[in-house]
Amino acid sequence: MAQISDSTANPVHSASLVKRMIQGVIPALILVIVFLVTAGEPDPEWGKFWRIRPILVLTFAGAMGGVCYYILDYLRYRGGWRMIVAYILSFIVYLFGIWIGFVLGFVGTYWH
């Protein structure tokens, strides 16, 4: 019979996945709301609810950035250069996701 190791003694994740997703969503949501508030008058061709799409796409992109941060926890807890790589990689993936979220959220409205 295989022995089960006690993985609760040294947890890999310091926070839950949902907490990390929320931490990714909040900055993305703030960015998109600030952009929408300062954007000015929309084109009448875009419809009444055109703002919903960028909000949904950007919050999803932010949540996926939080998931990436959560997944890379195992590297962060190894310390040394792995920790630095994990932080840099998490940051780059988050910024890339937010950028793609902006593009996909606003395509057809601000970007043609």
Image (cartoon, rainbow, N blue to C red):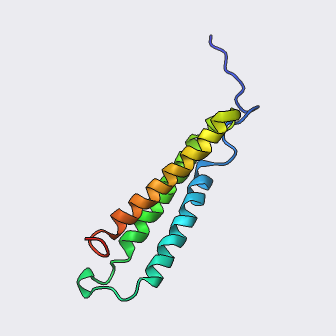
**Residue found at x 70% / y 29%:** 7
The spot of residue 64 in percent (x, y) is: 48, 52
Seen from the viewer's position, the closer of residues 30 and 56 is 30
Residue at the left extreme? 45
**Residue found at x 30% / y 68%:** 107
Q: Left or right: where does residue 38 sit relative to residue 2? A: left
Task: Tell me: residue 73, above or below residue 28.
Answer: above
**Residue found at x 29% / y 75%:** 109
- Which quadrant of the figure has residue 82? top right
- Which quadrant of the figure has residue 42? bottom left
The spot of residue 108 in percent (x, y) is: 26, 71
Q: Left or right: where does residue 29 sit relative to residue 104? A: right
Q: How many marks?
A: 0
Residue at the top extreme? 1
Seen from the viewer's position, the closer of residues 85 and 109 is 85
Which quadrant of the rendered structure holds the N terminus? top right
Q: Left or right: where does residue 110 sit relative to residue 29? A: left
Seen from the viewer's position, the closer of residues 101 and 5 is 101
The spot of residue 15 in percent (x, y) is: 67, 48
Which quadrant of the rendered structure holds the C terminus? bottom left
Residue at the right extreme? 9
The spot of residue 12 in percent (x, y) is: 67, 36
